[in-house]
Image: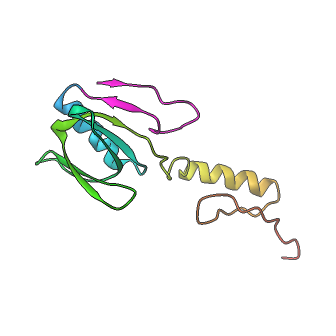
Amino acid sequence: MTKEPTPPENPGLQGTAFRPTTDAERADAIDQAFDYRGDVTLTLLGGKTVEGYLFDRVRDDRRCRVMAEDGSLTAVAYDDITEVVFTGRDPATGRSWENWMRIYAERKQAGLEASLDEHGRPVDVREDSAG
């Protein structure tokens, strides 16, 4: 399987393209796409592409399902897939516990409120010294 390197500004799999050459490589690429929380683009035999969130895979049937942005669902046979590209941003990238703790410590040390909003971004509010 050929794998293009991940650009350094895109941590994780975003921007990575897998071109599997065996059934095992294809299954591995699909498993990674299933675990990925962003959109993928599947290139099929004949050049057709399917883009969306790969939300389901049935290993025994060697099929996966992709939900497009408009909500439509497409079932794809593993054997029809010639390339898997991780095209969408994975919203969980950079939200590890270690990253959260690093931000927490940095903000606490700077005298800022050490919490994150519902999107995992630091809250920019100075702590109330009257406390």
Q: Quadrant of residue 21?
A: top left
Report x, y in % for residue 56.
25, 54
- Residue furthest out toward the right: 130
- Which residue sits at x=16%, y=36%? 79
- Image vertical order of residue 75 relative to residue 30, above or below: below
Q: Position of residue 104 (x, y in %)?
A: 68, 56
Q: Residue 19 or 104: which is nearer the viewer?
A: 19
Q: 98 left or right of 38?
A: right
Verify whether residue 37 appears in magenta: no
**What stretch of residues is rendered in magenta?**
1-20
Residue 110, percent from left and from top: 82, 54
Q: Is residue 125 above or below residue 8?
A: below
The N terminus - image quarter: top left
At horizontal 22% and vertical 49% (from top left) the residue drawn is 64
Left or right, 60 with reference to 10: left
| Quarter of the view holding residue 28 | top left
How many discs appear? 0
Does residue 6 show up magenta in the picture?
yes
Q: On the image, which quarter does residue 131 sit in?
A: bottom right
Q: Kindly identify the residue that appears in the image at 60 percent across and 59 percent down.
A: 120
- Main secondary structure type of the part rendered in magenta: loop
